[in-house]
Image (cartoon, helix red, strand yellow):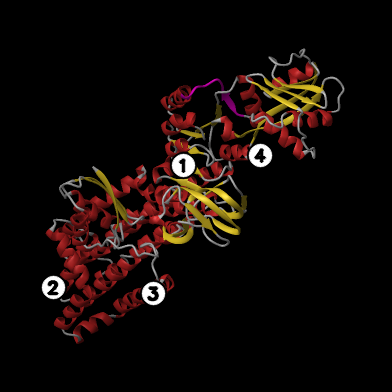
Amino acid sequence: MSTLELPISGMDCAACAKKAQRALKRLPGVAEVEVLLNAEKAIISIDPKLVTRDRIVQTIEKVGFSVPTPKEDTPYYVKEGNDLQRQLFMALGILFGVILLLVVVGEGLGLFESLTEIVPLWVGTLIVMAFGAKIFTGVIKSAMRFEVTAHTLMSVGGIAALVTGQWDTAAVVVFLMNVGVYIERYTSEKARGLLKELQAMAPTKARVERNGEEVELTIDQVRVGDIVVVRPGERVPVDGLILEGQATLDQAAITGESMPVEAEVGDKVFAATIAKLGYVKLRAEGVGRETTFGRTIKLVEEAEANRGEVQKIADKFSGWYLPIVAGIAVLTYLLSGNIMSVVAVLVVACSCSFALATPIAMMASIGASAKRGLLIKGGKYIEAIKTANVVFVDKTGTLTTGKPNVTDVVSLDGTPAADLLQLAATAERHSEHPLAEAVRAHAREQGYRAGNPDRFEAIPGKGIRAVIDGKTVEIGNRRLVQVADNSEVARLESEGKTLLIMAIDGKPAGIIAAMDSVRPEVAAAIKAIRELGIERVELLTGDNERTAAAIAGPLGIGFQANLLPEDKIRVVREAQAKGDKVVMVGDGVNDAPALAQAEVGIAMGGGTDVAMQAAHIVLMREDWNLVADCFRIAGRTMRVVKMNIAFTAIYNMLGLSLAAFGIIPPIVAASLQAVPDIGILANSSRLIKQK
């Protein structure tokens, strides 16, 4: 089996996506089909021996859609004439409002009745058939496949109006069906808009060194290991490692962070970032879909496949809605015998609005979140985080920066702390240990410059020994340097700090304490998520209890220490067994099982690929404020979804009732058919600009 991804154009609503999915599933050799409406693509698992790409394309075209061919320079999803399209839609909106006004006024004053008396029925019928040909053809093709669409009922209503001599009603039905098609297409385009903005940022060309010369290639011609050149103002085309040069990079596309960063030899850079200043030459490590940005687009595209319960219920209901409307129409005729009331029932129904109510809001929210560095892998995780009441958090790299920082320099023999720090930085000059780097960094911050030791020796598991200006300096743990317990040592250890004990010529001279520091924004973020309804926040760490208490205490959260990866997933399962809905925040390989087990796993952007793959939400920059944003966005999105569903349900219930009782005539019922789509679009578009 192999997986085939195909772009599909022409899908305007969920019914269109279902039609394409059903057609593809019938093909021999097709095992699974996922048609993603907002990503405008199909992901198909096929047996290449039984079905070909051409056969699949023919099937898609047979049901009324098309498979666009990518252009060399411009991806298929970057469409020209967006400004013109917006102007046309605005004009259509104004025209729709004018027509609605004319219909209501015309019906009230009897103008349409006079019009039908002047214009012969056969002329009116020709007008209706000419303007409705495309829709009627689609309805007939669907009927031949034993499918009922939203336009089926309206078409039946329009034909019924013609049969009863009401060609004006049929004309309004056809006109507003066409307007409805444009509105639904615009609504879907609005949801796809942010995704397309992301896709449009994907680099399409790269300048590569081949045989000693620079050549410009399309991205699909670039290979891992190629040497890529990036000049000022250009977009970095691949993920890679800088081999030469330095540049100021705008990484907003990846991290959502507006401040540029400085990159030099040895630094990793990402595709879709922009070299504001400087020049770099880099070795390609990820190309196309395998770059960080490519994976970001893929996650957003496929987010639609992860539908939540609310969306699944809406999808199922939209499938049952048309038969329900048909039943109401039959019942209306049996009870009243009024054919015009039946026509009104058929044309007022709007099934697409139920199918659009949830995905439009979800995709607007997911797309807006992606632009600010927050990747949500599906609507069901937005629903899940809204119901969560417990948050478990990893320590190293998640709550903390993952890098030790010197916090204290304490003298034991009267030597000034500044002299101890200068001496320690020189002694640690050639050490590769993270704590040695912390000492050197602290010395630089304090304005001290490390010299060169006369002799240096690393002692595995203990520390280092160096000779400086004839003095023997030893720095390490208690196994290297013995020191008597005192109140200062007890205080530092009780705070969970790691101690580097320093001896000069065999005598204890001082202590340098280091600690993995808590991210500065964590306290405010934890306070925010508690205010948003989280009852329990708890630290899960493999570190010892003393260190865990030192981190958790000031934050006011609980902790469990000395945990292995299997212990973390056990803690998550125990909470779930009690009925809790769990969010897990982590960054490492050891967090991956718990991230996958939780209702929602959130991975820090600077963490491992394994953690980001296992998680359901990925933070593209290491900022705990984004964790709080997850809860805020989920709450806002679910409020919009519920408003969409409530509005659609009330509107359709009211419209069907008024039509069934003959209160509104068919011509007015037809005019009101597209209103729910406009309401859903207007309400959901509020999510595009998240505060």
Q: Do the residues labelled 4 and 2 touch (CB within 8 Å)?
A: no
Q: Do the residues labelled 1 and 2 touch (CB within 8 Å)?
A: no
Q: Could you classify mark 3 by the number of other residues whose Cα lies within 10 Å: few (under 14), some (14-19), or many (20 or more)?
A: few
Residue 88 numbered tag: 3
Write down the residue under mark 2.
163
Write down the residue under mark 4.
520
Q: What element carries label 4?
A: loop
| Residue type highlighted by circle 4 | Pro
Label 4 vs label 2: CA separation? 73 Å
Whichever of callouts 3 and 2 sits on the residue coming sooner in the sequence is 3
Residue at 49% across, 51% down = 369
Q: In which quarter of the image is residue 142?
A: bottom left
Q: Where is residue 298 in the image (x, y as percent from the top left)?
A: 40, 49
| Residue type highlighted by circle 1 | Ile
Whichever of callouts 1 and 3 sits on the residue coming sooner in the sequence is 3
Residue 617 numbered tag: 1
Label 3 vs label 2: CA separation? 34 Å
Point out the frontmost of discs 1 and 2: 1
Q: Could you classify mark 1 by the number of other residues whose Cα lies within 10 Å: few (under 14), some (14-19), or many (20 or more)?
A: many
